[in-house]
Amino acid sequence: MEVDVKRILIGFSVLSLSSFCNSSAFSDVQEESTMVVTATRMAQTVDETLAAVTVIDRQEIARSGARDVNELLQGQAGMILTQNGGIGAQSSLLLRGTNSGHVLVLVDGIRAGSATLGSFTWEFLSLAEIERIEIVRGPRSSLYGSEAIGGVVQIFTRRGGDKPFQGYVEGSGGTLGTAGMVAGISGGRDRTHFNLSVSHQQSDGFDRMQAGEPDKDGYDKQSIALRLSSQVQGLDLEASLLRNQLTSEYDSVWDVGENQTEGVGQIFGLRIKGSPAANLEVTLTGGEAMDQSEELLDGALMSEIITHKRSFGLQVDDQLAMDHLLTTGVDFSEDRVSGSIDYTHSQRQDVGVFGQYQAYFGKHNFVLGGRWDQVQRVGNQTTLNVAWGYELPWENRLFAAFGTGFKAPTFNQLYDPYAGNPDLIPETSKSWEMGVHGNLSHGKWSLRGYTTQIDHLINWAWDETSVWLTQVDQARIVGVESELALHLADWDTKMSLTWSDPRDDKTDRKLIFRPTWSGKLDLDREWLGMRVGGTLNFQDSRFADEANTLRVAGYGTVDLRATYPFMNNWFMRGSVKNVFDKNYEIVDGYHTEGVSVLVTVGWNGL
């Protein structure tokens, strides 16, 4: 199926323009603006920040009917997720056309991901333990250092509510032998809140790989999350723990037998915030992220990699004057690698110092930030960010920004005994962005255009005798993102549409796995005592090889969902994925799931 995204774009653009032109005709009553902390490392409303931000809260996660993070994020503005054959399979997130390693992932403020692969293991995550997700698109290395070329995704674990004690439990079952369980307790009183939750999800799966053995490839996933926050003598204290464990079966064209991946991801974090003086706020953070991956063949261990990321940070926010804020800080991180591969170096440290100034001058607001990083055995990097905004009539805002970013080479790229290259230097980027966004009494909208140039891209090279890593590649990415959220005629409508043209700067060929068009449409409403809705996800065709000779066809899928509350604190939720049983591929050579059904019964009480 080739998606006629041009018609969708025209309709969406007309609707956005109409909303802009007529926004003054709406009521002046505005919804409370959503708060975000990732864009500037401090709490702001989405309207105040000059970054491209999408926030997905717990309510939206629950009603989406998504079974994993991939289904939730797929189709969001600027986001493409690849998955090698359904839930539990290896996944990658491509943000604004950049590589999977160009996205920094934080969990409750702690850097997470594999130090060897240089990317985050999205398939480990369970949605049951997530309170909210903040997606910041565009370079943020000036605040966070390495990896934040395409943007930053921050995941917040579930926190306690305002009731002294509350329990919740869910049980689910569906096609392909899928079953799941969620249980937790949470509470809050005065200045203390807590949440403890556990979940389990499993499935017999389906045959993922076309060239592999014709068998079912299932998965088994467990997760536990703990979050505790309290106010003590003027200090805000918070501790969090998230642990995910996954066993996933897969096929291989190299090995005959039962292949399995067993992985563990664990993130522990601490945060202390206080105000030692008027207009001054100091935040201390510390934590560790562990990523463990084992490859097994017929139950025998073939390889094992364990990485530990330890990080500490100090941040000072100084309200210099009304509408003038200065943020300064220092970050320290240390990566350690162990396992079955003998790396030349198994440890690396990174020290970063950053500063950011934010100010309002009448209808103008500015952000100016910079950071200096020293990465052990890699070198020093300096990054910056400049942004400007201007308030337009009818609650609209014009903005423009420029930012640089970098990505330090991974342990695999530098020190792998077979293909590593210790002479590699960091990948670097320059990004420009301009757009406009606005508030409506019935919703919000935005339209953004951007371009990114990435230099010193790390890629494979080979000759008749060997394969190694080099960095002579360059990429240039041009894109446009549109978002619209409305509540009209009892319908909640949320749309996103992305046009992207990421190319190799030397060959002018498109980068692999990047569709030109992608988007998502959500429709939800209350009907006969139920919450009903549906989602359209679509992508244009994309190339699966660097020579641009192997094209993967575009596709569109439709999902349906409904939630029905019954009795006291009980509910039933059902979803049908891929309603029309579309046969399509996301990654060449890997099957995707056909029509599937999942039914959940849950209780929230006490």
Image (cartoon, rainbow, N blue to C red):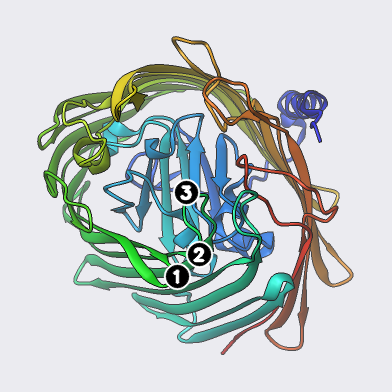
Q: Position of residue 9 (x, y in %)?
A: 76, 26
Q: Can you identify the residue that label 2 sits on?
A: 257
Q: Is residue 444 visible?
A: yes
Is any atom of residue 395 visible in this view? no
Label 3 element class: strand
In the rendered image, which quarter is residue 561 located in?
bottom right
Per the image, the residue denoted by label 1 is 298
Considering depth in this image, is 254 or 386 the residue closer to the camera? 254
| Residue assigned mark 3 | 134
Q: Quadrant of residue 564?
A: bottom right
Residue 138 horizontal side relative to residue 545, left or right: left
Instruction: State the separation of the CA atoms marked 1 and 2.
Output: 6 Å
| Residue furthest to the right | 528
Query: In this picture, is 140 found above or below 281?
Result: above
Q: Which circle's residue, 1 or 3, is located before the other in the chain? A: 3
Q: Secondary structure at mark 1?
A: loop
Under mark 1, the amino acid is: Asp
- Can you tell which mark lies on residue 550? none
- The residue shown at (23%, 35%) is 420
Q: Disc 3 versus disc 2: distance between alpha carbons?
A: 41 Å
Circle nearer the viewer, 3 or 2:
2
Q: Is residue 302 above or below residue 172?
A: above
- Tell me how far mark 1 sits from mark 3, CA to CA: 40 Å
Pointer 2 local density, CA inside 10 Å: few below 14, some 14–19, many at least 20: some
Confirm or deny contact between disc 1 and disc 2 (CB under 8 A). Answer: yes
Residue type at mark 2 is: Gly
Q: Earlier in the sequence, mark 1 or mark 2?
A: 2
